[in-house]
Image (cartoon, rainbow, N blue to C red):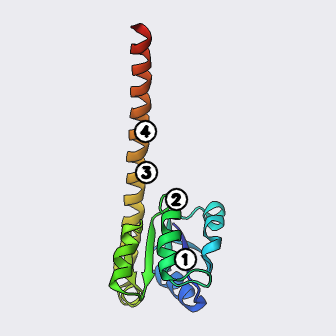
Amino acid sequence: MRILIVEDNRADAYMFTELLSHFLEIEADTTPLASEINRKITTFRPHAILLDLTLEDSKSHETIDRVIPAIADKAPVLVLTSQTAEEVGHSIERGAIAVFEKIEAVQQPEKFSRAIVSAVAEFAQRQTTTYKVKKAQASLLHCEGILNAQQ
C-alpha cells in the first residue's frame, strides 16, 4: 500500500512510516509542503494520504479549506493533528475520511493501521459506486436519445 505522508516534522514523518510498517506492507513518500501534494499524488499515486494540518506553507484553517477539498477525490485523506475539536469537525466536513490525534495514532498503532485500510476500502467502494452511477446515467441518456429519435 502506498501512503503519502504530508508532515513538516521529519521526525514525525519517519515515526509514522516506521510505525505503520510494523502493521502494514507500505511504501511511503513524504512532503512537508501543501504545494507539493498534487505533484506527489501524480507521481507516487498513493492509496492514502496522511495529512498534518500545520505545514511549512499552509496553516490549519488554510489546509482544511484549501488542501483537503483539492485532494479528497484523489485518495482518502486521514488527518493527523493535535488541533482543536472544531478543526477536527471542519476537516471531516471538507472531505477528510478520518481524523486522528497524533498521540492516539502512536499509542494505538494497530487501530490506526486498520483505520487506514478501512479508509482505502471505503474510498475504493465510493469510487466504484460513482463510476457505476455515471455509467448508468450515460446509458439512460443514450436510451433517451434513441427514444427521441424514434418519435
Above or below, comparing residue 42 to residue 77 in the picture: above
Residue positioned 58% across, 89% down in the render: 9
Horizontal side, residue 32 vs residue 67: left or right: right
Percent of width and height locating residue 40: 64, 67
**Viewer-proximal residue among 66 and 122:** 66
Which of the two labelled residues, at mark 3 and mark 2, occupies the earlier sequence position? 2
Cα separation, mark 4 vs mark 2, equals: 17 Å
Cα separation, mark 3 vs mark 2, equals: 10 Å
What residue type is disc 1 on? Ile
What residue type is disc 2 on? Lys
Cα separation, mark 1 vs mark 2, equals: 14 Å
Q: Circle 4 is placed at which residue position?
A: 134
Tags 3 and 2 touching, CB below 8 Å: no
In front of the other: label 4 or label 1? 4
Above or below, comparing residue 106 to residue 96 in the picture: below
What residue type is disc 4 on? Lys
At mark 3, the secondary structure is: helix
Image mark for residue 127 = 3
Q: Circle 1 is placed at which residue position?
A: 5
What residue type is disc 3 on? Gln
At mark 2, the secondary structure is: loop
Q: Tell me if residue 23 can be seen.
A: no
Horizontal side, residue 16 vs residue 115: left or right: right
Image mark for residue 74 = 2
At mark 1, the secondary structure is: strand
Q: Tell me if residue 107 can be seen.
A: yes
